[in-house]
Image: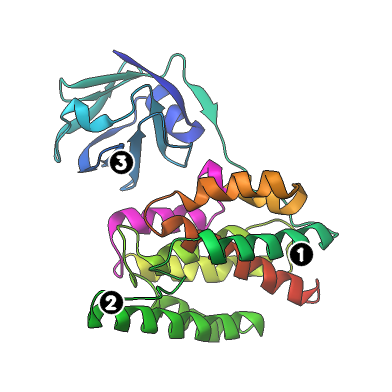
Amino acid sequence: MREIISGDVDFIHRIHDSEFNGFVHSTFNQTFNIHCLEDGELYTIAGSKIDNAPNTFIIDVDHVSSMKIEVNDKVYVVNKVLYIEDKLALSIDKAAAWQGQIPSYPSNVEVLKRNLMTMKEYLRIHGKAGGIKKPLVTNSPFEAEMAEMLEKRVALFLDELLNNRMSHALPHAVSILGLGPGLTPSGDDFLVGLFTVLNMKNCPYNKWWLFCDAVTTKAKTLTNDISYMALKKAATGKVRESIISLLNSLLIGNEEDLILSLNKVINIGSSSGTDIAFGLIYGLEANINAGGKL
């Protein structure tokens, strides 16, 4: 029996009510994902080096790969304990409940403007290239074409976003779904960051939640299951703890706080964290540009 260190509050409630049956969907070094038969969503069991996130339990190991969990292993709940075959039993008894909440958009944006300038310069130097940050050198004609395509489609989308043309922006957003390198493609990661901002209470673009929902509906058949779940959650303002911390640092933090939070996001995946960070930047800049006039 292993104790869960912390977990998404909704996931904890589901286990508490014994409403969970499924199978292992995918396995990685630090995480494995479970497909839940009741709601069709993916849930994640992660090692202690991963931050809190929607539908996620953090357990006291560095690498879950050592547990020999395999794809299609049966997953079920008995008496508030989550079982993966006879390989792993997880108790929620001592789990710290985590519920992420993105901050509200500020009435005064001066600190935000200053921090965005710092963040963009830091990403220019330290951000991981290959996705939204275009690589200086590509390894193949395919990679070069992909980078060019991503750059052009994102630019077309941002033009419509800045002009508050939701219906025109939608097809351009859909065109970047599944586009780019990585387990979670760069276009999807960029949209996760953007969706986070569009879900901020009191932001000028807060009516764009309809846009988030429409893009997510299209994403179901245009990207992989893992990336789709990240988009689905972000469309309702549910994102991992490190993204929320970065957004808080942008709004109220000093430079030291900002860089610390930004580095944690940059370290997500290969270029995923950098792609998410750019989504936050462009979403926030659109709101600042709107100046509350939408």
The correct choice, above or below, for 32 with respect to 291 in the image is: above
The correct choice, above or below, for 63 with respect to 42 in the image is: above
**Numbered disc 1: secondary structure:** helix
Residue under the image location 61 percent in, 84 percent down: 165
Q: Name the residue under label 1.
A: 113
Residue under the image location 80 percent in, 73 percent down: 291
Which portion, as a residue range, is magenta?
221-243
| Quadrant (top left, top right, bottom left, bottom right) of the C terminus | bottom right
Rounded to the nearest whole Å, what is the CA distance between mark 3 and mark 2? 39 Å
Q: In this view, does 18 lie to the left or right of 280?
A: left
Is residue 78 visible from the viewing direction of this image?
yes
The correct choice, above or below, for 167 with respect to 27 in the image is: below
Structural crowding at the residue carrying mark 2, measured as other residues with C-alpha within 10 Å and reported as few (<14), some (14–19) or many (≥20)? some
Q: Which of marks 3 and 1 is nearer the N terminus?
A: 3
Q: How many marks?
A: 3
Q: Which colour scheme is used?
A: rainbow
Q: What residue type is labelled 2?
A: Glu
Residue 143: mark: 2
Q: What residue type is labelled 1?
A: Lys
